[in-house]
Amino acid sequence: METIALILLLLLAVVISGTLTRLSPVPVPLPLVQIGLGALIASVAELTVPLQPDIFFLLFLPPLLFLDGWRIPKEGLFRDKGTILELALGLVVFTVIGVGFFINWLIPAMPLAVAFALAAIVSPTDPIAVSAIAARVPIPARLMHILEGESLLNDASGLVCMRFAVAAALSGTFSPAAAFGTFLWVAIGGVAIGVAVTWGTTVAKNWISRHLGEETGSQILISLLIPFGAYLLAEHLHCSGILAAVAAGITMSYAEHSGQALAVTRVRRSAVWDTVQFAANGVIFVLLGEQLPQIIAGAAQVVRETGHHEPAWLIAYVAAINLALAGLRFTWVWVSLRFTLARAARKGKVPYVPGWRLVAATSLAGVRGTITLAGVLTLPLTLVDGSAFPARDLAIFLAAGVIVFSLVAASIGLPFLLKGLKLPPEPSHQKEEDQARDAAAEAAIRAVERAQHEMGDGRADVDLYVDVGARIMELYRQRIDGRAKIGAEGDLVRKLDAVERELRLAGLRAEREEIYRFARLRRISDDMTHKLVREIDLLEARFSAG
């Protein structure tokens, strides 16, 4: 009962954090509120959550990484692939080496392998935290796509580097040649397993659905199990479960293009995954706050062993590491930008040259979040000989400090850097959207025409099918004709569509309220209420998204 009560308390804290964030008159990052609530729980309820690193890693990372890979915009990922790879791979290695040596020099009590592990842990970035911070000063869309792509890939590269560093700390030895060969096996094997698990599962469930019908609950559960299956299989074969989860998510996005799933399955599955993401991200930060008191106590003890008797040195360490991270990131972004501009010049292009504010914003947007916290909490408790893992509490505190410090710094700095920033206009995808909508409408017209002939063939009331089909096809033709108009006529059509959408939404809300009034008066049954309200909800969701 105590464990169940604790889980419910953590989830309640996640719910309350969202409300407190919306009530705040200033834009406070949601993770900071969740950390504060966790610390409050620890001080008031006096609860302690014993975290097992392997279990924590398995519970939280596979679904989060899988969902990142599934939902990331692929066109932005491929368009800016050079920049993203430079940040996600090159910057991670640069950070691990530079910050690793810096931490070892700053804190001699922390072994070099542990310092490298900590540097690898703090290298992944978290765009969710950035978007929450910049909600009132929107981040440029292309920069956000780059940050999302960087986060997806540097989650994997940073955590893989951490695994190597931890292995070196446990064994006491490190061979670059052996590590490179192992890395190839770990990386290639992890990606292959992730692709194979998702592809194989998708083929199997589609075959079953075609022959036996589709059950929505089973389909949703399968999507939840795929990341865990890919992760566990990869780890069993000594490959990267992290890369397997990411690859499984990316493959899932392409597998979904087959359009085999029912509409109701896609709608409900999306809602379930939104809930999983919100809950998992929130619980991780609440757990960080709950663990803070004992983390601080353990870190203070390590600091005393270094000869510094004042725990205030902990704050100095956190500030120094954040400055090192920011300096290395700014340097890498600036140098990378110079090379990008030079390559464009050699090709005869005249690229947009970003100012220092955009470079600084890109550097400051490297906020650490969920993956950093999940990674550092998976550091082993003991070495091979059974002795305590060196400086574990200090490493956890420093990683937590980096998260909090980077969130606060971005909260203050990003609005200032992005406010009034002049950027080239984002390319409009309206033409592609109109083409896709027109093609879909034309396909619908052909399908309706074919279906009306098949359904009315040989029937006495064939005219009924012809009239209904003509009415439906006319709606599609009106949509095509409306999008074909340009200039003032096109603007008028879009304005009419917007007015129609608002009026439809007003009507749907009135419909729903009347249905509920009938239900309160017991004039319709609960089943009928649910059916009618669901129909209205789906229509409202459609027009709201439009």
Image (cartoon, helix red, strand yellow):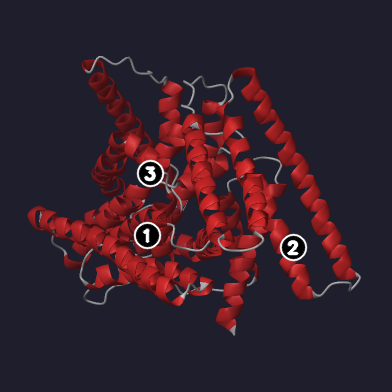
First of labels 2, 1 by sequence position: 1
Q: Nearer the viewer, mark 2 or mark 3?
A: 2
Q: Secondary structure at mark 1?
A: helix
Q: Is residue 469 left or right of residue 102?
A: right
Residue closest to the far bottom: 1
Question: Which numbered dot is residue 375?
Answer: 1
Query: How many marks are shown on the rendered structure?
Result: 3
Position of residue 382 relative to residue 91, above or below, is: below
Q: Which residue is mark 3?
A: 74
Q: Secondary structure at mark 3?
A: helix
**Residue 27 is drawn in which quadrant?**
top right
Amino acid type, residue under disc 2 in the picture = Val
Amino acid type, residue under disc 3 in the picture = Lys
Q: Which residue is mark 2?
A: 533
Q: Residue at x 54, y 55 (%)?
A: 453
**Residue 147 is drawn in which quadrant?**
top left
Amino acid type, residue under disc 1 in the picture = Gly
Q: Is residue 524 left or right of residue 386?
A: right
- Answer whether labels 2 and 3 touch (C-beta < 8 Å): no
Residue 427, horizontal then vertical, whole percent: 46, 26
The answer to whether residue 372 is visible is no
Q: Secondary structure at mark 2?
A: helix
Q: Is residue 249 left or right of residue 189?
A: right
Bin the neighbour count of mark 1 within 10 Å (Cα to Cα): few under 14, some 14-19, many 20 and up. Answer: many
Residue closest to the far left: 177
Cα distance in 3D space between marks 1 and 3:
26 Å
Q: Nearer the viewer, residue 256 or 287?
A: 256
State which quarter of the image contains the C terminus. Answer: top right
- Answer whether labels 1 and 3 touch (C-beta < 8 Å): no
Position of residue 357 relative to residue 433, above or below, is: above
